[in-house]
Amino acid sequence: MKSIRILLSCILTGAIFIFGIKPALAFCGFYVAKADSSLYNQASQVIIARHRNRTVLTMSNDYQGEVFDFAMVVPVPVVLTEEQVRIAEP
């Protein structure tokens, strides 16, 4: 009787893992530039670290183009102050 419970638990757990887990979809932002400019990004690397009530989001992008006047839009759940945003060297 005990082995049947263990077997059923394993089957149920396996079914949950196979059918219950959905892939995570992520969106790390987009670039905005003038309409006549060409700006491309081949890859983005994103790291999210959380400690207590502080979350740090680190992004590395390899944009290509001759645009000097552009913006990167990153959706966040709260309004950030200028002191909370830092641009680091690669």
Image (cartoon, rainbow, N blue to C red):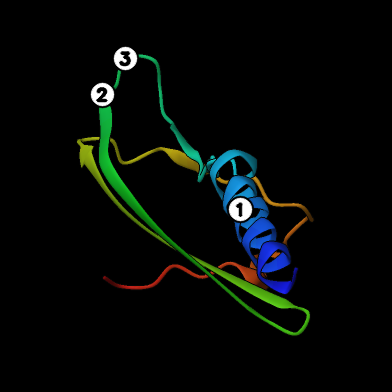
Give the residue type that dot 2 points to.
Ser
Image position, residue 55 (x, y; %): 66, 73
Say left or right for 2 vs 68: right
Image position, residue 24 (x, y; %): 55, 44
Query: Which residue corresponds to mark 3?
Result: 36
Image position, residue 1 (x, y; %): 75, 68
Question: What SS does tag 2 mark?
Answer: loop
Query: Which residue corresponds to mark 2?
Result: 38
Q: Residue at x 50, y 46 (%)?
A: 28
Q: Which residue is farthest front?
A: 1
Image position, residue 46 (x, y; %): 43, 59
Give the residue type that dot 1 points to.
Ile
The image quadrant of residue 36 is top left
Question: Label 1, label 2: how many angstroms apart (C-alpha)?
Answer: 53 Å
The quarter of the picture where the C terminus appears is bottom left
Query: Which residue corresponds to mark 1?
Result: 11
